[in-house]
Image: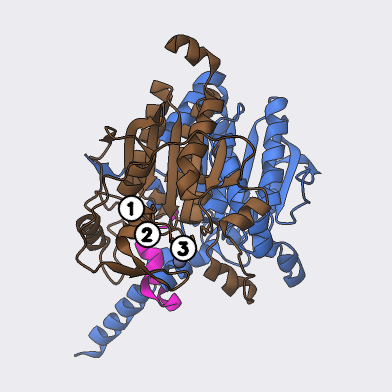
Chain colours: A brown, B blue
Amino acid sequence: MSWFKRQEYKIENEGEKTVRTEGLWIKCDSCDQVIFKADLEANLHVCPKCGHHFRISARTRIDLLLEPGYEIVDTELKSTDPLKFSDLKSYKSRLKKAQKDTGLNDAILNAVGKLGDHEIVLSVMEYAFIGGSMGAVVGETIARAVDRAYESRKPLIIVAASGGARMMEGIVSLMQLAKISAALGRLDDEKIPFISILTDPTTGGVTASFAMLGDLNIAEPNALIGFAGPRVIEQTIRQKLPEGFQRSEFLLEHGFLDAVVNRKEMKSYLSRALDFMKQPSQDKVAG
Amino acid sequence: MTEQAGNLEQVQAVAEATPAAWVKTELARHSQRPYPMDFIESIFTDFSEIHGDRAFGDDAAMACGMARFHGEEVMVIGNLKGRTVKERIERKFGSPDPEGYRKALRAMKIAEKFGRPVFTFIDLAGANPGIGAEERGQAEAIARNLIEMSRLRVPLIATITGEGGSGGALALAVADRVLILENAIYSVISPEGCASIMWRDASKRAQAAEALKVTAQDVKSLGCVDDIVPEPVGGAQANPEEAAQLIDEKLRWHFNEIKALPLEEMLQRRYEKFRNIAQFYTT
Ligand SMILES: [Zn+2]
């Protein structure tokens, strides 16, 4: 594919549990073929038949990107339900359920560790937690990842998977866009690398803030990426959206992504980019 | 039940059916409410518009221009809504496209280059959703404004005069001071949008407005804006001139405060305000 040779890294996948109760087979959302689950996992949750990239948990993502021995950090924050929000259900009960289902406090995990030879700060969104939506906890946790990168001068990678701002935190969730963007401004001023990875789906306020602000914005194939949700646009313009609209390849074509990279090649792509971004002065420090 | 008690119950039922947040939402959207450009014309002098984003076009929903604020050279930016049906359609009901946000950023960069403060005025339901907006990177345009405004090296004051609709409003409101008019709203999603998603029923918009805490008073108490600008009795539309005067007073007060700060301290304070904003979590 590329005319230059990429350095290959073996990808470890220890964190993923292979024992499942719901059966050994799974139907691909994209090609409808039935796949052996173990095969899917061995293939980094990419359909061996059609290449469809299945959504994966934040933890699985971290296992795919970082070498064993990484450290999960900034896990202590929990939402205080600032609006005391309730619709058909209370936000509190939604939070509780999401916490129980995912084992996380909110839709985000920060980690520090090595990607190949590079010490990095990694922040990964968890789509299974209320659609990866961003409230005060996600906002602060990502901002803390930015702070860590700033203070340690390590490159930052954020993996987005989100429906956008968390409605149940109202204006508080909107302010998180400004919070993270301001933190990234400071990082940028210091020339510390930031790579944004956009996965399926990345929409709304997450796209309209940090996900589009990478030195490089890289997406997995066929991920839904946009500002307004497809249904909102359809309702507004009262016509069907074209095939492939708001998918990774559409954004690449319109100039908003630097690359669309397969999950299998993501790590080597990132490692190569981090080589490029490494500042000569750091090399000197490292001897 | 006596007749009186029955009436009282009816009154209470009506009050419950239209929560304060919805009354304010309707005031914020009042068809006679002065729009950003009305306020700009009353408060500033010598407005000279500048057009275009130098990349795609000139967004009809965004106005930028050089102006004078009590004699001082400033840049003003406001979205345009339009009064007549024709105007409203042309201006997309006030919702800017990516080129609108990019034009605004270009204006801010000119202001930065020549050391002129920037005043923004916001009254929009949101950034324009559409095929073209997505093709031209609405998300990127908004994101770019957020990061660049957070570090723009001149004083920035934003005023939400009507609807502060989500990211499309925030993209003009990362500022040293964010003011909001007494009957304006600021929200992550429209009450209708929230109602149709969370209640699966857009008619629950009043309830949604209440639940979202969209009023100026609510967002102030959540620490998401800096100050509330009082309006004339009955709302800004009742006396636009007085409304403009009240904004002018607040702008002068805040502008003088910011101007008194050394540049680096002003920037540090802006950074810290947004870095520490809306911290609703426990550890
Ligand atoms: Zn498949």
Which secondary structure, mark 3? helix
Rendering coords of residue B198 (x, y %): 37, 69
Residue under pointer 3? B24
Amino acid type at image mark 1:
Ser
Q: Is residue B260 above or below residue A9?
A: above
Q: Which of the two residues, B109 or B71, is positioned nearer the viewer here?
A: B109
Please give left or right for residue B99 compared with residue B6 in the image: right
- Camera-near label (2 vs 1) is 1
Q: Which mark is residue A74?
A: none
Structural crowding at the residue carrying mark 3, measured as other residues with C-alpha within 10 Å and reported as few (<14), some (14–19) or many (≥20)? many
Q: Is residue B25 magenta?
A: no
Image quadrant, ligand 1: bottom left
* Residue at horizontal 62 percent and vertical 28 percent from the top: B154
Q: Position of residue B60 (x, y in %)?
A: 75, 56
From the top left corner, tell me how far across and down residue A158 is, in percent.
Answer: 44, 41
Chain of the residue on which disc 1 is drawn: A
* Image: A137 above or below B108: below
- Secondary structure of the residue carrying numbered label 1: loop
Residue B105 percent location from the top left of the image:
67, 40
User: Residue at the location (67% across, 53% down)?
Assistant: A253
Q: Which residue is mark 1?
A: A57
Q: Are discs 1 and 3 located on one and the same chain? A: no
Q: Which mark is residue A131?
A: 2
